[in-house]
Image: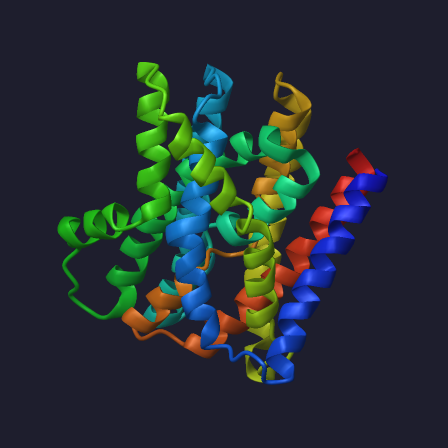
């Protein structure tokens, strides 16, 4: 328990440092774009390589992919029904935001600090199913409702998925693991050095993007979104935590995974499909803050 709270304290300090650097104009919020590219394209893939290179993948870990994927489908279609009376653009924006989770930037640094590589392999498998939702289902919904008479393009969706270096790294390492092929030790050692930067950089980025100014006009829609997303996630997470016949780490992953913040990919999607970027950014910040305290509270109850 002391280690758990200590890791959260470290996270708060580093996130606070990122926020302070932005407030004192040492860094700009636009600098976060370059930092996020470094994380997603370099440090996170390196961490995935180190974590998944030599793990034993059993059926329970594969089940995490299934849970993340089918939960994403379920809550996406349920969300479209809940927001069916909203305008086409609002319905599309909400449907796009609901299903995906921010695992790479938010969950990974906290999980790494609390549970180490053992925790990362569980959340990594959960993230594979989540990535299919983010780059497939969320993109599909966002593009479909962006304007009338939109034709869904398999080529565009596939292109998004192929360009995701973390997703491709997951799949490649997963296939290599199944075949029993071991990457050269030098390659693993270099990846391990690079991966050490992922946790502090990801937490700094969260601080840089953190914003406490919210538009009052977004209040009702934001409350409705958060109540629905976290209500469903908490309810199903608790049920699965109670009934699943697996080890504690598996159940922690499911319970925590279903209450993580919205995916960072919805921000560029909102630009691409011309949705309300300020609303998307505001709600994304709210989910980061709420998920942080929920994770801390759940951890103190269960650990």
- The correct choice, above or below, for 36 with respect to 74 in the image is below
The answer to whether residue 224 is visible is: no
In this rendering, would 151 be left or right of 160? Answer: left
Where on the picture, by quarter, is residue 183?
top left
Q: Foreground residue, 119 or 235?
A: 119
Residue at horizontal 42 percent and vertical 58 percent from the top: 38
Residue at horizontal 64 percent and vertical 82 percent from the top: 23
- The correct choice, above or below, for 146 with respect to 262 in the image is below
Q: Position of residue 51 (x, y in %)?
A: 50, 32
Give the position of the C terminus as an image quadrant: top right
Residue at horizontal 52 percent and vertical 53 percent from the top: 105
- The correct choice, above or below, for 289 with respect to 43 in the image is below
Q: Foreground residue, 83 or 70?
A: 70
In this rendering, would 207 be left or right of 82? Answer: right
Where on the picture, by quarter, is residue 72?
top left
Q: Residue furthest front?
A: 186
Q: Foreground residue, 49 or 174?
A: 49
Q: Position of residue 149 (x, y in %)?
A: 15, 65
């Amino acid at each position: 328990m002391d280690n758990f709270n200590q890791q959260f304290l470290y996270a708060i300090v580093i996130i606070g440092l990122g926020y302070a650097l932005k407030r004192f104009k040492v860094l700009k919020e636009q600098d976060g774009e370059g930092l996020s590219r470094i994380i997603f394209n370099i440090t996170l893939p390196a961490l995935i390589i180190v974590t998944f290179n030599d793990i034993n993948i059993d059926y329970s870990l594969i089940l995490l992919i299934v849970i993340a994927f089918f939960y994403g489908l379920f809550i996406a279609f349920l969300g479209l029904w809940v927001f069916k009376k909203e305008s086409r653009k609002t319905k599309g924006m909400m449907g796009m935001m609901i299903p995906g989770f921010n695992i790479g930037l938010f969950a990974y640094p906290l999980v790494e600090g609390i549970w180490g590589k053992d925790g990362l392999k569980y959340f990594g498998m959960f993230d594979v199913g989540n990535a299919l939702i983010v780059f497939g289902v969320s993109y599909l919904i966002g593009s479909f409702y962006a304007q009338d008479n939109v034709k869904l393009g398999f080529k565009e969706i596939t292109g998004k998925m192929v360009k995701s270096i973390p997703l491709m790294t997951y799949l490649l390492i997963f296939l290599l693991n199944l075949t029993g092929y071991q990457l050269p030790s030098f390659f693993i050692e270099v990846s391990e050095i690079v991966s050490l930067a992922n946790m502090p950089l990801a937490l700094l980025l969260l601080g840089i993007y953190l914003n406490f100014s919210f538009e009052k006009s977004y209040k009702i829609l934001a409350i409705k979104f958060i109540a629905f997303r976290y209500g469903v996630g908490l309810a199903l997470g608790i049920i699965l935590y109670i009934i699943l016949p697996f080890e504690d780490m598996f159940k922690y992953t499911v319970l925590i995974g279903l209450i993580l913040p919205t995916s960072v990919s919805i921000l560029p999607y909102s630009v691409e499909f011309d949705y309300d970027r300020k609303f998307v950014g505001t709600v994304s910040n709210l989910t980061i803050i709420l998920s942080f305290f929920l994770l801390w509270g759940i951890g103190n109850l269960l650990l």
